[in-house]
Image: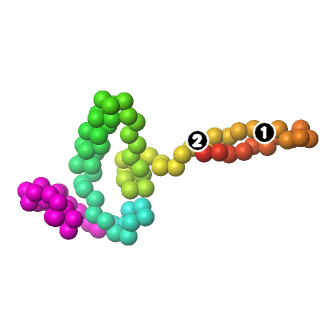
């Protein structure tokens, strides 16, 4: 409904047609969604990556919403060893 309100009719119809034939499925935290065909998503991500390269920006596609193409949206944990007062060593984890 929002797309229909804000997009020109031709753009709305193009986007709407891209979802035709796609099944409803549970992805990430969403209840149910229709995704663009994988080929369309991959081509879009490739265009986005090229734009990011030109602007010297790192682009990450979250696997929570894009299971085939994405990577983990959680920051990797870095281990840090800390020595206590009595000489014991503890491994502490802090997000990157």
Q: Nearer the viewer, residue 68 or 12?
A: 12
Q: Main secondary structure of the magenta part?
A: helix
The image shows residue 30, relative to residue 55, as above or below, that is: below
Marks 2/1 in contact by CB < 8 Å: the verdict is no
Please state the horizontal and vertical placement of residue 92, each as a whole percent of the image.
Answer: 72, 45
Residue 34 falls in which quadrant of the image? Answer: bottom left
Q: Quadrant of the C terminus?
A: top right
Q: Earlier in the sequence, mark 2 or mark 1?
A: 1
Q: Residue 50 placed where, x, y %?
A: 29, 33
**Hey, which residue is sitting farthest right in the picture?**
86
Q: Which residue: 68% across, 40% down?
A: 79
81 horizontally vs 23: left or right: right
Task: Tell me the SS state at disc 2.
Answer: loop
Horizontal side, residue 34 vs residue 66: left or right: left
Which residues are the magenta region?
A: 1-24
Q: Residues within 10 Å of mark 1 (few under 14, many from 20)?
A: few
Residue identifier under label 1: 82
Give the residue displayed 30% in from the left and 43% down from the top. 45
Q: Secondary structure at mark 1?
A: strand
Q: Which mark is residue 96?
A: 2
Where in the figure is residue 5, as x and y percent of width and height? Answer: 16, 64
- List the single residue furthest toward the front: 6
Q: Is residue 48 visible?
A: yes
């Amino acid at each position: 409904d929002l797309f229909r309100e804000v997009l020109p009719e031709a753009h709305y119809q193009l986007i709407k047609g891209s979802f035709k034939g796609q099944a409803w499925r549970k992805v990430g935290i969403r209840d149910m969604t229709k995704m663009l065909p994988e080929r369309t998503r991959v081509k879009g991500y490739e265009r986005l990556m090229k734009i990011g390269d030109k602007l010297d920006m790192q682009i990450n596609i979250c696997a929570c919403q894009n299971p085939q193409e994405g990577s983990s949206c959680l920051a990797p944990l870095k281990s840090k060893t800390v020595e206590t007062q009595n000489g014991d060593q503890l491994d502490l984890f802090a997000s990157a």
